[in-house]
Image (cartoon, rainbow, N blue to C red):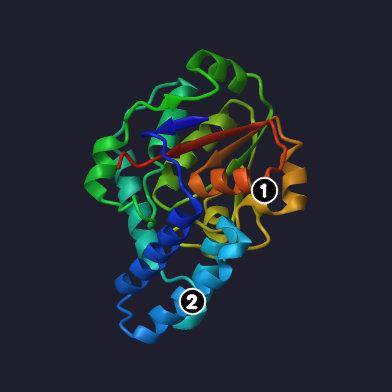
Amino acid sequence: MILVGGPRYVSVSDCLLCALESRFSELRRLGISDVRVFADLGKAVMDLASLGRAAVFIESFNSMVRMIGNADPHADEKAMLERVASELIGRLRLGDDVLDYVRLAASANSVDIHEGYDFRVEDFVDRILEEPIWLGTDPASLRSRLGNVRSVAYLVDNAGEFQFDLLLIRKLSSMGVDVVVYARSRPYEVDVTYDYVASLARNFRVRALPGNYSAFWYGDVVNELAGYDLVISKGLDNLETFMERKPGLDNVLFLFRLSAR
């Protein structure tokens, strides 16, 4: 596990408050002012509470897009994030060490819309080269491991950071690693989707998840992931779904950022 930022514990009540904050913030950003939509969405979050964290976040998002009649409400934001990240990458000078690409991919996990993840371009630029915290591994061990793997499943997360994921994916491919990228088939917040990732696939393959949950949610996908030498998982949603579902995989490397707040 490679973590950027300090860890924090999220209780059930905090999770529900976070989901409400997330969805209401989205409605405000989208210019929705009808109080009935806020009330209906708040009720949807509470009705989903007993189903667990993943269902609360995913299904409340799905309820929201149905209410507002917009299946991909963050399309413009995602395009902006990808553009900003692409421009930033043009300023970077990376060498041959694969760990530099791993660090970059972990540090780039700073784009989200939940409480504690208020994305600002300035922070993204300032913190992109922040040194991560290594948990359960160390640079020498990971460098050795990456030099010996032959197959990697890469679970992508948000737009913007995906441009940095591409750098690592292409670096691994250049080392002779067979990389398969797993992406959601339907939109969820600012996450990249299968169609977008597939449009950029040159030296790697792309697998569409059945819906817009994390790869760890689907039993058949988990069975596939068990067959890879290494699974690189981006973002907190994948980590939290892994913790919730307990898929029993021992080949997963998590790369993510936590807020310092």
Residue type marked 1: Arg
Q: How packed is label 2: few (under 14 Cα within 10 Å), some, or many (20 or more)?
A: some
Q: Which residue is mark 1?
A: 245
Q: Are marks 2 and 1 in contact (CB under 8 Å)?
A: no
Identified at 55% across, 43% down, the residue is 239
Q: Position of residue 111 (x, y in %)?
A: 37, 50
* The one of 216 and 56 positioned closer to us in this rendering: 56
Q: Which residue is mark 2?
A: 43
Residue 181 in sight in this render: no
> Quarter-wise, where is residue 233 in the image?
top right
Query: Looking at the picture, does residue 106 appear above or below residue 25?
Result: above
Residue 169 horizontal side relative to residue 6, left or right: right
Identified at 31% across, 39% down, the residue is 260
Identified at 46% across, 39% down, the residue is 256
* The one of 179 and 5 positioned closer to us in this rendering: 5
Query: Looking at the picture, does residue 104 appear above or below residue 141?
Result: below
Identified at 35% across, 26% down, the residue is 131
Residue 218 in sight in this render: yes
Q: Position of residue 160 (x, y in %)?
A: 39, 50
Marks 2 and 1, the one that precedes in the sequence: 2
Q: How packed is label 1: few (under 14 Cα within 10 Å), some, or many (20 or more)?
A: some
